[in-house]
Amino acid sequence: MRLRKGRRQEAGRLPGADECPGAPAATPGLAVELRGVRRRYGRGAGAVHALAGVDLALPRGTFTAVMGPSGSGKSTFLQCAAGLDRPSAGSVRLGGTEITGMSENALTELRRSRLGFVFQAFNLLPSLTVEQNVLLPMRLAGQRQDRGRAAEVLARVGLADKARRRPGELSGGQQQRVAVARALVTAPDVIFADEPTGALDTGTAAEVLGLLRHAVDSLGATVVMVTHDPAAAAWADRVLFLADGAFADHLERGSAERIAARMAALTGRTRAAAGAVAGAGVAA
Ligand SMILES: Nc1ncnc2c1ncn2[C@@H]1O[C@H](COP(=O)(O)OP(=O)(O)O)[C@@H](O)[C@H]1O
Ligand SMILES: [Mg+2]
């Protein structure tokens, strides 16, 4: 792990990462700020450094994709950035709010009222109608369930006529569009998407990605999406590449081809480094 220090230092120079060096106050206009975030699993010799010092600053109204080989820390990153997991060190700010020391209750409240989530498996409640699913974040946050607002976001995702249906009556693509509507309903500071197109065919995936793109461009939403699919990542403004728990590379407005090539290079480097470590007789 130590052998890859050079790449970790590069991560510190990602655009935006050094916009407020050491500043204790939140930087205006940033939706997501991570400073020196580490997440270690286990202790001592067997410890795994799933995140090995991540710095990141994402302005509001941006669409960011996070890619990386299996085991590079994508899930851990998303969980820490979204307040679902606690870093071992470092700080996370969402919409200007420092969440690092927050109580579990306060974090839950913040997630419900100020974050949106879209998961690979849709995660809709099958016994609720589409409208009730969309209103769920408001209900859980103890807010007034604004049916007009639900109708508005359902119209945005092209499902105005499906409000009274149950998720099981809809196609996979339609269910994911409901999940996007649910993520939009509270006008959250950030929408976190974890492989949102992983269970969809290409055409349906493009529809869902188009909705996320549209949310960023026309509603000023901020989207952070983990994906393994270069075609999905190409919808983002910027792709960040994770390797061994640190950001190793990035690409602005890349095509699917360029993103795929960058991923291949990264995976090759990671393999080569692992080989070099093994060859040197040091435990990887
Ligand atoms: N709960 C856990 N306990 C121990 N190790 C874990 C745990 N979760 C993840 N890891 C390890 O952390 C590293 C990063 O995992 P993860 O964030 O799931 O990567 P990715 O999503 O990119 O595949 C991997 O080495 C993984 O084995
Ligand atoms: Mg994962």
Image: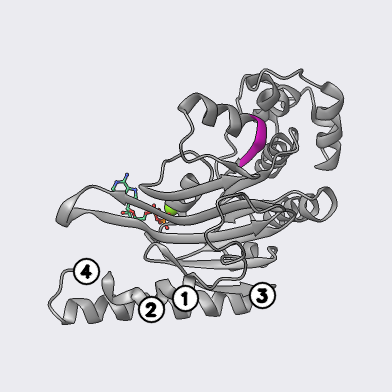
- Residue 202 visible in rendering: no
User: What amino acid is labelled 4 in the image?
Assistant: Ala
State the SS at label 3.
Answer: loop
User: What amino acid is labelled 2 in the image?
Assistant: Gly
Residue 238 x, y percent position in the rendering: 65, 67
Residue 29 appears left or right of 256? right
Q: Is residue 233 above or below residue 123?
A: below
Q: Earlier in the sequence, mark 1 or mark 3?
A: 1
Which stretch did the figure color magenta?
Answer: 113-117
Q: Earlier in the sequence, mark 4 or mark 2?
A: 2
**Distance of label 4 from label 2 (alpha carbons):** 17 Å
Q: Residue at x 66, y 73 (%)?
A: 252
User: Residue 254 — which label?
Assistant: 3
User: What amino acid is labelled 3 in the image?
Assistant: Gly
User: Residue 6 — which label?
Assistant: 2
State the SS at label 2.
Answer: helix
Residue receiving disc 1: 10
Q: Earlier in the sequence, mark 2 or mark 3?
A: 2
